[in-house]
Image: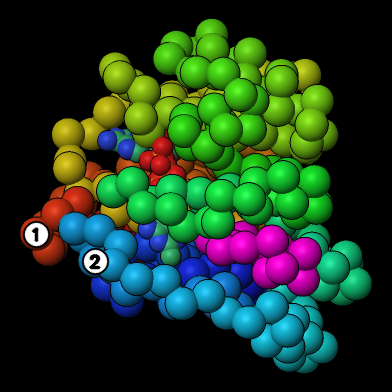
Amino acid sequence: MKKVLTIAGSDCSGGAGIQADIKTITAHKMYAMSAITALTAQNTTGVYGILETDAKFMGLQLDCIFKDINPDAVKIGMVANKDIIKTIANKLIEYKAKNIVADPVMVSTAGSRLMEEDAANTLIEKLLPLATVITPNLAEAEVLCNFPIKTKEDCIKAAETIFKKIPTAILIKGGHLEDCADDLLWDNGSIHWFKGERIDNPNTHGTGCTLSSAIASNLAAGHDLVTSIQNAKDYITGALKANLNLGKGSGPLNHMYNL
Ligand SMILES: Nc1ncnc2c1ncn2[C@@H]1O[C@H](COP(=O)(O)OP(=O)(O)OP(=O)(O)O)[C@@H](O)[C@H]1O
Ligand SMILES: Cc1ncc(CO)c(N)n1
């Protein structure tokens, strides 16, 4: 059985973070492990509190995982602060982790900060360059490239700019583009658009977490990057179309649709 590790924050309401990742990895029939960077008190209406993990304890979780069950792929989500980011980066290097998918989670869908403001440079310099692919949404890509992104042409310019700072494959997610849900993969100068029809479903809590853990699961299965992203995009489309309607805000996805 393939093993996938998620390094992310907990979402007690089960829609995003660690819980979305474990559901996604399990739906891919793989063994899920988790190293938790923070507890969040949140639900479909917003984030109400964050308790960050002590950085030393973060390292201990990663030692326990890598010394015992070596993951075939690693997904990184919410990383909370500078010390946690440095610890994760050091451990990934120490244990020679492979197939790393890093989602640079900064702000929740409802607008709450999930990473301390002064941590962006540490994320860019220490952690993101270790990834096989990084998966910013439009707002996160704007932070990484320092200019506004409105169109698909802007996405290409943004990827070129980000690549100069973080020389790895970049998937800019178009979930927040106006008329489509196309995602752009920029891989060492080559461009690949993943076409997505915009699904009329307000329940999109955890789409980013789900996409990145689905990509990690596909890389763990041995697929190449383009195939892994296409399969992950198909997975998220199915989970959105299956139209679960839970909670009073932007609800979670349906991971049970093809089980
Ligand atoms: N309404 C939609 N219809 C179709 N695909 C969508 C829709 N919303 C998001 N997606 C897809 O879901 C994936 C995640 O993209 P999105 O831009 O929502 O990420 P995110 O903002 O990081 O997510 P999160 O809300 O979890 O922070 C992408 O492949 C995107 O194209
Ligand atoms: C723990 C966590 N990670 C990521 C997101 C982004 O969707 C969230 N809302 N919560």
Q: CA–CA distance between discs 1 and 2?
A: 9 Å
Which quadrant: the C terminus? Answer: bottom left
Which stretch is magenta? Answer: 73-87
The answer to whether residue 116 is left or right of residue 204 is right
For residue 43, which numbered disc appears in the image? 2
The answer to whether residue 103 is left or right of residue 168 is left
Q: Quadrant of residue 248?
A: bottom left
Which one is earlier in the sequence, the residue at label 1 or at label 2? 2
Is residue 170 among what the camera can see? yes
For residue 197, which numbered disc appears in the image? none
**Residue, x 17% and y 34% (percent of image)?**
200
User: What secondary structure is marked by label 2?
Assistant: strand
For residue 248, which numbered disc appears in the image? 1
Task: Tell me the amino acid under the disc marked 1.
Answer: Lys
Most foreground residue, 103 or 38: 38
Residue reaching furthest to the front:
118
Residue reaching furthest to the top:
153
Quadrant position of ligand 1: top left
Q: Position of residue 202 (x, y in %)?
A: 17, 42
**Residue, x 80% and y 52% (percent of image)?**
126
Which quadrant: the N terminus? Answer: bottom right
Most foreground residue, 50 or 181: 50
Task: Tell me the amino acid under the disc marked 2.
Answer: Asn
Q: Position of residue 93 (x, y in %)?
A: 88, 65
Is residue 65 among what the camera can see? no
Most foreground residue, 80 or 16: 80
User: What secondary structure is marked by label 1?
Assistant: loop
Do tag 1 and tag 2 residues touch (Cβ < 8 Å)?
yes
**In the picture shown, does residue 21 fall above or below 239?**
below
- Display coloring: rainbow
The answer to whether residue 45 is left or right of residue 6 is left
